[in-house]
Every structure is written in C-alpha cells, then in structure tokens.
Image (spheres, grey):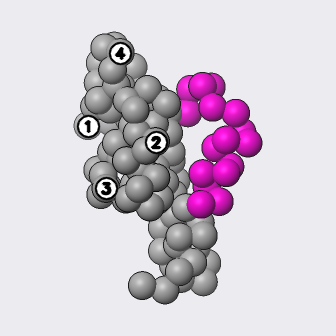
Amino acid sequence: MDDLQAAVLRNEKTRKWYGLIIAVSTDKLGLKVKPDPSYKTEILLLHHTKEDVARLVDGVNFIPAWHMNKKSWLACVLDGRHTVDVIMSHVDISYNLSAKKH
C-alpha cells in the first residue's frame, strides 16, 4: 500500500476540519475524462453548503468529495485549473462554516 500523503486544515477554535489536501489516484476521482489509473494528483476537500455543492460539482472543475459526505463536501483538483484566488475564496467559505456552532 502506498504511503498516505495528506494535510488536514483544522479550525483552531472549534477543532473542526475545514479542509483536507490529499494525493489520490486519478482513477478514484470520478472525473469525466478517463484518467491514467497510475497517476496521482492532489485534491483539496472543502466543506460547503449543500446548495453550493449541488451547484458547483460538475465533474470537471469540482468533483464529489473523496471519502467525505458528498452532500456537504466537494473536491477541487489541484492541477493548475484554478487560480489561487478561486481556491482561497472556497477555503474561506469552508473555514467560516467550520467556525459555526452546530
């Protein structure tokens, strides 16, 4: 088994996760383009509202979360298709959701 490469983003106050960066084989991601199963890419898993997830997940720019609740988490493939500003705006949304008391 390959060594797991991952980093957790956790809110210091609530201790809730708001992000996970992980290297995953592209064949496990459900991309619309058929990937090479031996290739790994980094993805960023982020918490969003159910409405945002339904609106954003398109199988290309954002994909269903990998091993997370697919209704309130999505994944951004970190392969250069998104600008830093776009990624950080979604990180901010996820962080703000993690700060709320449920």
Res. 3 in view: no
Magenta residues, dominant SS class: helix
Q: Which residue is mark 2?
A: 56
Q: Which residue is mark 3?
A: 71
- Of circles 1 and 4, which is in front? 4
Does 52 sit above or below residue 55? Answer: below
Asked if residue 61 is among those painted magenta in the image, a careful observer would answer no
Question: Where on the picture, by quarter, is residue 81?
Answer: top right
Q: Quadrant of residue 35?
A: top left
**Magenta segment range?**
78-93
Q: Mark 4 or mark 3, which has the lower sequence index?
A: 4
Nearer-N-terminus badge (1/4): 1
* Nearer the camera: disc 1 or disc 3: 3
Crowdedness of circle 2 by 10 Å Cα count: few (<14), some, many (20+)? some
How far separated are the C-alphas under marks 1 and 4? 25 Å
Q: What is the CA distance from the residue labelled 1 to the residue labelled 2?
A: 32 Å
Image: 87 above or below 25: below
Residue annotated with mark 1: 1
The structure residue drawn at horizontal position 52% and vertical position 72%, both measured from the top left corner, is 98
Image quadrant containing the N terminus? top left
Residue found farthest to the right: 85
